[in-house]
Image (cartoon, rainbow, N blue to C red):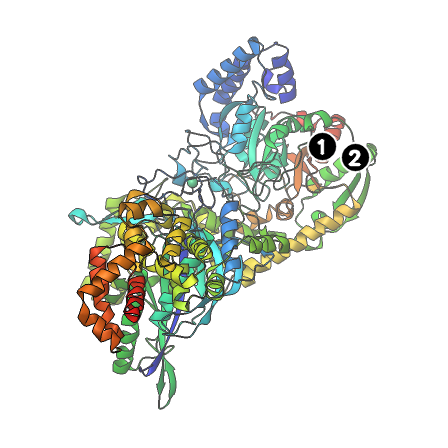
Amino acid sequence: MTEPYTIIIGLEVHVQLSTASKLFCGCSTAFGSPANTQTCPVCIGMPGSLPVMNREAMALALKTAVALNCEIPRRTKWDRKQYYYPDLPKGYQISQFDLPLSEKGYLTISDSRGRFEPKPIRIIRAHLEEDAGKSMHDEVAGKGDSRIDLNRTGTPLLEVVSEPDLRSPVEARAYLDELKLLLNYLDVSDCNMQEGSLRVDANINLHIDTPEGPVATPIVEVKNMNSFRAVERALDFEAQRQYEVWQETGTIMGAPGGHKTTRGWDETAQVTVPQRTKEESSDYRYFPDPDLVPVTTTEEQVEAIRAGLGELPAALRERLQKTYNVTPYDADVLVNQGRELVDYFTELADRCGDGKMAANWVEQDVLRWLNDRQIGIGEFSVSADALAGLLEKIKGGDLTTSRGRDVLTAMLDSGQSVDAAMRKLGIQSVDQNELETLCGELLAANPKVVEDVKEGRLKAVGALIGQAKSRNPNVNPGQVRELCLKLIERM
Amino acid sequence: MSLTDLTATELLAKLTQGEITSVELTGVFLDRIAAVDPTIHAFLRIDRPAALARAAEIDARRASGQPLGALAGLPVALKDVLCTAGEPTTCASRMLENFRPPYDATVVARLRAADAVLIGKTNMDEFAMGGSNENSAFGPVHNPWDTDRVPGGSSGGSAAAVAARMTPLAIGSDTGGSIRCPAGLCGVTGLKPTYGRVSRYGLVAFASSLDQIGPLARTAEDVALILGVLAGHDPADSTSVDRPVPDYARTVSKPLSGLRLGLAREHFGEGLEGQVERAVREAIKVYESLGATVREVSLPHSKYAVATYYLIAPCEASSNLARYDGAHYGHRTNQEAMLAELEIERKALDAAGDTEGLDRLDNALVRMYRRTRSEGFGPEVRRRVMLGTYALSAGYYDAYYLKALKVRRLIRQDFDRAFEEVDLLAGPVTPTPAFRLGEKVDDPLSMYLFDLFTIGANLAGIGGISIPCGFSAEGLPIGLQLQAPPFEEERLLRAAHMFQTATDWHTRKPPAI
Ligand SMILES: [Zn+2]
């Protein structure tokens, strides 16, 4: 690191769990419905209404916590976090305070490009809480009217809080990517940042070495980041800003003016800007929610969850490297595409018996096709089995790699089998007699090449390959070369 | 004898035998309300046509031989803290004066399913906070035995309505004695069931871990009749308990043999008025004459009960009442006046060059909250919200709320231990008979101490019943309280019925009205 400081980052990630109904009532959690159409007395906090825990939400939360290597206490409870805001209709949010459903886990991050060494990022806790509604501030005509949509109110949120173990914006990005990937593998959230189903707040400050010893800059909580890219950029900006402010003012954590502040990321201006900090001194007056009973989880339940997790990204990367002999980079690319693509790859590799070749084809040809069309592997019309047939033909020398690509494109366009696509493209195996005739004719027509080869310049034969291909596109260049050399030797 | 003097059980028999119709019966009670309630003010709302239409519908079903519910045709009054779909549910507060919930409380739905005729909503202390019913935003309830006196609270309207023969059955809620105390002061029978026995869904919350809905009626038999309808598991209330509901109405008349009564030493000490103690001790002699054995037991932590209660209840109340902020429903302050007020303050601060003051000045949202809540809540509600907010604040939580929870556990253990030796605890309901209206309004502490004997059951989560057991020299009713281990409502009702077969206190009628 060239900067004279260390960046200290901790992340708080809120993930909407993909349950059909809300955390404490039966309302739908679907996104994008007309405002206030997915509400009931419970989620809008009508007098006398009572919450009832959604067991599915707790199951998804526990599954995620176990996958994050968290400890699962035998007993967890619900608490009320109290504050006044119009999008919080009860005047409190049902959350978890001192007995969260999980704590003390970790998520290992790594970088296939080698920008940092693999390392575990400790998770302080992951707990469940209900989402608030949305305030829409309507500034039209200077009225400053606000409108409230309570459709989102009560949607289950899993809050995952990391220790400040991240040392760069790149690491922060890697943590988010890995967390999102894990959530995808677990199938617990759609992680759509645009729709708000995954939200990130970052705490960042710097540890600076000075001649008088190390100092820390005041912690800043950065909010309003709408993509992982934005997180990375906001943290880059914030680190630089904090360093400059420190150089100017010398303000350090704990000193006057050195308290924690909140800043928002301005995507347009690409800067962080101060946010109202009134809430920082706020006291949420947490206390146990008397309307809900504590939840117990047995050792057996945790073990059953663990057994049902399936193979998770870290284990999968390792297996691909060991079993299929692919590079760490390839394993990363494949695993990052999700479980379905990995399944496609392993089937392909098993059938064609060549993991590296399978990885190349999946990463270059299959993924390009998917990305161009913005579709998933489920919509890829060539089965792993069919693609394996094609790769076998290439390995057997019946097709060049580039002809193979043409065949794959034809298969995708027409939905035909390998053989049918080859026939359509006019690709046939060339008969040995036909090839000998062709080569004989070429040698007769190119005495200079024959002479050069005889004098030991074997490369000269390459000139004949192009001519052979233009006379018959189906010939195998290797075979042409071999046969020509053999014939020259006999001459 | 007027129909209004009969018990619910007697009226139900007449309805079943076709001697009277529900329309007749409902009409008689509505007439009684019209005649008496201007003096008592037990009801906040009566919908005469709706009640009669409902009665007619039940009569028609009875006439055509269709199956009917357990309370078919009987009028029932509801404390106005229970949500009734589409009808005002005010909690006797300005805050909810115009609030109409879109749903029925579970108990209301159960009463409708049992073919009860919901005759009206009764007056109460605002948000069930109070022991005298003087905290109603719509004016106090008067005790039918002496209209200068309080009926007790917070279910004072329900108790007074039963006592004054305006309804045979009423529903109340009990957080620290709010059913038993007014039942005692009005001379009726009132049961606070075990926490979790009756669903709280649709009961506007005061203190969620203490609140429990229960019936008030003239006799234990009537209470048993309606409790069977109210009790039972409700998946909409996570704290309601899933266990079978005994057939209370069938078993209530079976006397208990070998009943072991416990008298808590701490409930017969300082503060208990002599004539109340005498009446209670006389009642216990009645039990002895019926074969019960009596022994003294101790609830050593009961001296902390009032302090514990007045931490836990306000803490939960401060949170439960946070939703009344003017943003979504209920009262909201006048927006123009609020903005004008802010503008005047802003200008004054500006003119004075007080930049710090300007910084601190509320924004419109915060000022809306402040004004709405100051206007919408009465003084007692504000006092408890402030108490609770304070006790839950950072730095005070451990010393107050957490400590109160620990003491609560000790109080529960006291009861557990006592019930190892005895079947029921017997004692007074309140330290004195009904006091005069206005007598304690400036002395909240003495008002709080009035709950001394009843709040233990709420803190411990157990059931308790108040039954009439005598009268004071001034002719005011005195109540006997029986308390039982969790889910022993059957035992409570059988014991209460035993007493009522041997005495006639419960049959006395307020002379004045
Ligand atoms: Zn809902």
C-alpha gap between disc 2 and disc 1: 10 Å
Disc 2 residue crowd, few under 14, some 14–19, many 20+, Cα 10 Å: many
Which residue lies under the disc numbered 2? B287
Q: Quadrant of the N terminus of chain B?
A: top right
Query: As drawn, is A460 to the left or to the right of A319?
Result: left
Residue A57 in sight here: yes
- For disc 1, the chain is B
Q: Which mark is residue B73?
A: none
Rendered location of residue A359, percent (x, y)? 39, 61
Q: Nearer the viewer, residue A306 or A196?
A: A306
Q: Position of residue A9 (x, y in %)?
A: 38, 71
The residue beneath circle 1 is: B496
Dot 1 amino acid type: Ala
Residue found farthest to the bottom: A211
Which structural element holds mark 1?
helix
Q: Nearer the viewer, mark 2 or mark 1?
A: 1
